[in-house]
């Protein structure tokens, strides 16, 4: 009886450790820009990334855009992957550079003036 209880306890403990390890891998894996790069770099066809595009914007990204993107990316890895957030207010924008991945480590903050807003807005549109 003691052997069965010990075996059961050992199996449960082992299962808990495996589950904890898998959860650690799941939640410690970078998301955001790094994941986006991975998804784009392994995509062979437009349909591979079509699911990544928000339904509202699907008409703005065509198969020709995908081909241009893939040709631009080439076979090399990027030197750097950056991730930015823009907080838009009525009279100002705040541009925040953060570390790519799961943590929101702020690397840089810029409050944009009107000229910067116009330039960035032209670039983004």
Image (cartoon, rainbow, N blue to C red):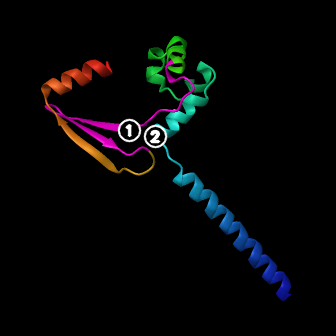
Residue 98 pos. (x, y %): 34, 44
Residue at 66 percent of width and 67 percent of height: 17
Crowding near pointer 2: few (<14 within 10 Å), some, many (20+)?
few
Q: Residue under label 1, please give it.
A: 83
81 or 91, nearer to the observer: 81
Which one is in front, 22 or 98? 98
- Extreme residue in the top direction: 64
Tell whether label 1 touches label 2 (CB within 8 Å).
yes
Q: Quadrant of the C terminus?
A: top left
Q: Which mark is residue 113?
A: none
Distance, label 2 to label 1, CA atoms, is 8 Å
Image side of residue 111 versus residue 58, left or right:
left
Residue carrying label 2: 32
- Tell me the SS state at disc 2: loop
* First-in-chain label (2 vs 1): 2
Image: 102 above or below 69 = below
Foreground mark, 2 or 1, reads: 1
Vertical comparison of 10 with 60: above or below? below
- The answer to which quarter of the image holds residue 4 is bottom right
The residue sitting at 54% across, 20% down in the picture is 70
Q: Quadrant of residue 6?
A: bottom right
| Quadrant in the picture for residue 123 | top left
Q: How many neighbours does mark 1 have within 10 angstroms: few (below 14), some (14-19), or many (20 or more)?
A: some
Task: Indicate whether 27 appears above or below 76.
Answer: below
Q: Secondary structure at mark 1?
A: strand
Q: Give residue 100's position: percent from left, percent from top.
A: 42, 43
- The magenta stretch spans which residues? 72-100
In the rendered image, the vertical position of residue 95 relative to residue 58, given as above or below:
below
Residue at 35% over, 51% down: 105
């Amino acid at each position: 009886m003691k052997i069965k209880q010990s075996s059961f306890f050992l199996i449960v403990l082992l299962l808990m450790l495996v589950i904890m390890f898998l959860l650690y891998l799941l939640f410690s894996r970078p998301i955001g820009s790094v994941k986006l790069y991975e998804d784009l770099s392994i995509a062979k066809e437009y349909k591979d990334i079509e699911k990544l595009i928000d339904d509202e914007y699907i008409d703005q990204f065509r198969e020709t855009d995908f081909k241009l993107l893939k040709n631009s990316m080439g076979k090399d890895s990027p030197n750097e992957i950056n991730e930015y957030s823009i907080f838009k207010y009525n009279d100002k924008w705040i541009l925040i550079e953060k570390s790519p991945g799961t943590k929101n480590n702020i690397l840089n903050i810029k409050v944009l003036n009107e000229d910067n807003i116009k330039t960035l807005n032209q670039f983004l549109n």
